[in-house]
Image (cartoon, coloured by chain):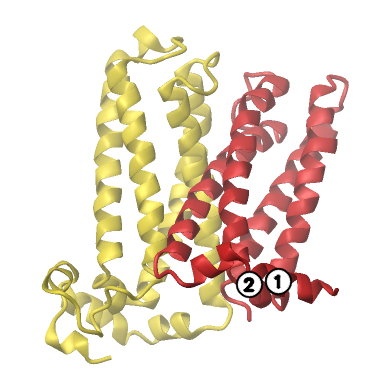
Chain colours: A red, B yellow
Amino acid sequence: MTLYDIFDMLERGPIGDAIRNSYWLFPAIEAVHLIGLSLLGGAVIIVDLRLLGLGLTKQPIQRVAASASPYLLGSLALMFATGIPLALSEMIKLYYNRSFWVKVTALAIAIVYTYTLKHPLIRNERTPRYVLFVLGLVSLGLWFTVAGAGRWIGFSS
Amino acid sequence: MRSFVEWLDTHAWSTALHESLHMYPIVETTHVLSLMVFVGTLAIVDFRLLGVAFRNVPVSQVTSRVLPWTALGFVVIVSTGVMLFYAIPIRTFHSVWFRLKVILIVAAGINAWLLHRRMTRTRVEWDNDRKPPLLVRMSAGVSLAAWAGVIICGRMIAYNWFDCDKPQPAWVNFLAGCIAEAAVP
């Protein structure tokens, strides 16, 4: 069974079918996906600005990250809950779509990076300032790549 | 108004931007990325005003340190939004979704202005409160709902269900301001 077969099988599933057969479902889920994106943006940016020495600078970095953490998790959950059904409705198109592969790759890296590198290094109070700065910069770059490539799925063929 | 958008449509740059292989997607993508900055940071402020996030940080500290970034995002999102309108002026002008979007943006603006006025008058009394007064929380809720509505409408502009170039029920023709001439593609 090739990857293509798996994509083909997923596209034929009930969720993909339901979305493809509906006039409104795809756009409606897309809109919620965008609302999730803006919430994700807020949760990421508030922490990354602080890492860059901007934004809530009077608060300890650990506290800013801890406060934003549930919003990051919540918006990620919303993004997956809407993004997976959207993908299931057009798996074959996505299989041949370069932007999709850029997006999921950047997304995987961004999630692993956030939870295995960024958050642990933030929690460690001995992490030097310049490391925190780079952590914020890389995080912004990763998440903006995910969002930009995601939008680009609709443009590239 | 209609003659103004018709005039925009005659611009060579409008057509160039609409048909550009790279520029149109770049502007569109920048519009979406600035959404993360604008609505994202605004949501942080609204969540603080609702008393559900950053409750240990004084409201004034959140607004003074975060809202400048919201303003920056606003400048980028409005600039790219104007460019997107400029690229497709007539269709967008007659879009029911675009019209609703503009109304919601104005509503969000009025709400923000009222909230700002209330804050400048009374904030010292509740700046450190983990949960601001009810009217402030309501205003923050209205803000979040209005911007969510703006995002929904913005996304829907791309779909042609209510376009003037096909038969529409009377209420759609009315809301979209369709005219006989606009029925010709």
Find residue B111 and report its image quarter: top left
Q: Residue at x 35, y 40 (%)?
A: B145
Q: Amino acid at mark 1?
A: Met
**Circle 2 residues within 10 Å: few <14, some 14–19, many ≥20:** some
The total number of labels drawn is: 2
Residue B159 sits above or below residue A130 on the image: below
Q: Describe the element under mark 1 as helix, strand or loop.
A: helix
Find residue B1 and report its image quarter: bottom left
Find residue B77 and report its image quarter: bottom left
Residue denoted by label 1: A9
The quadrant the C terminus of chain B occupies is bottom left
Q: Please provide percent x and percent y for residue B114.
A: 24, 30
Q: Residue at x 20, y 87 (%)?
A: B183
The answer to whether any part of residue A151 appears in the image is no
Mark 2 touches mark 1? (CB < 8 Å) = yes
Q: Describe the element under mark 2 as helix, strand or loop.
A: loop
Residue denoted by label 2: A12
A144 relative to A3 in the view: left or right: left
Residue A10 sits above or below residue A37 on the image: below
Q: Residue at x 56, y 39 (%)?
A: A42
| Closer to us: B52 or B46 | B52
Residue B162 sits above or below residue B149 on the image: below
The answer to whether any part of residue B49 appears in the image is yes
Residue farthest along the bottom direction in this orientation: B184
